[in-house]
């Protein structure tokens, strides 16, 4: 089963060099243990573009979908046999990046 781990932050580009080193080490462990699917950081919410083409009019809006103090600053997609393993991995990711994370199973 695959899981999304969203990294929650309130400041863009705020990771320290120590945090980035810890994240790279965590990513290496995920690869070695077969849990790695994908990971990446996201640009600041101000760089977002919201596109709504539900009615065919193609409405495009600059800026984030939601105005919020906190936002998704990055993500991991993990492979784990069950929720307990995914929770353990998410906790390790939280420690590595020194941020809160949200864990959600992917559907499908």
Image (cartoon, rainbow, N blue to C red):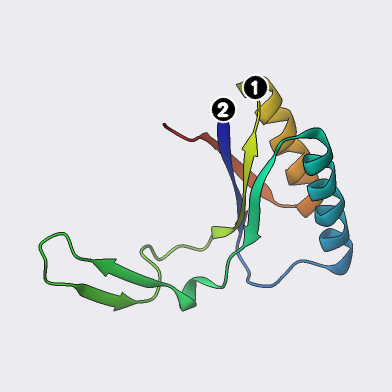
**Alpha carbon distance from label 1 to label 2:** 6 Å
Describe the element under mark 1 as helix, strand or loop.
Answer: loop
When asked about the image quadrant of residue 102, the answer is top right
Q: Earlier in the sequence, mark 1 or mark 2?
A: 2
Front position in the image: 79 or 65: 79
- Residue 64 drawn above or below residue 31: below
Q: Residue at x 28, y 68 (%)?
A: 51
Q: Mark 2 Cα within 10 Å, few/some/many (few <14, many 20+)? A: few
Position of 75 with respect to 50 (left or right) is: right
Q: Mark 1 Cα within 10 Å, few/some/many (few <14, many 20+)? A: few
Quadrant in which the N terminus is drawn: top right
Q: Which residue is drawn at 63% across and 69% down?
A: 11
Q: Mark 2 points at which residue?
A: 1
Q: Name the spot of residue 46 as percent of width and height, x first.
A: 47, 77
Q: Name the spot of residue 78 as percent of width and height, x first.
A: 64, 39
Position of 57 with respect to 8 (left or right) is: left
Q: Name the spot of residue 101 as percent of width and height, x first.
A: 63, 45
Front position in the image: 35 or 61: 35
How many circles with numbers are drawn on the protein?
Answer: 2
- Residue 21 drawn above or below residue 105: below
Q: Mark 1 points at which residue?
A: 81
When asked about the image quadrant of residue 57, the answer is bottom left
When asked about the image quadrant of residue 52, the answer is bottom left
- Residue 97 drawn above or below residue 89: below
Q: Residue at x 29, y 76 (%)?
A: 61
Q: Name the spot of residue 83 as percent of width and height, x first.
A: 61, 23
Q: Do the residues labelled 1 and 2 touch (CB within 8 Å)?
A: yes
């Amino acid at each position: 089963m695959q899981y999304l781990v969203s990294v929650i932050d309130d400041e863009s580009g705020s990771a320290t060099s120590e945090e980035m080193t810890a994240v790279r080490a965590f990513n290496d462990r995920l690869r070695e243990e077969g849990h790695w699917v994908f990971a990446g950081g996201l640009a600041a919410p101000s760089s977002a573009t919201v596109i709504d083409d539900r009615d065919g009019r193609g409405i495009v809006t600059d800026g984030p979908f939601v105005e919020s103090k906190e936002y998704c600053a990055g993500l991991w997609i993990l492979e784990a046999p069950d929720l307990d393993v995914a929770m353990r991995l998410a906790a390790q990711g939280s420690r590595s990046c020194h941020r809160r994370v949200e864990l959600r199973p992917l559907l499908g």
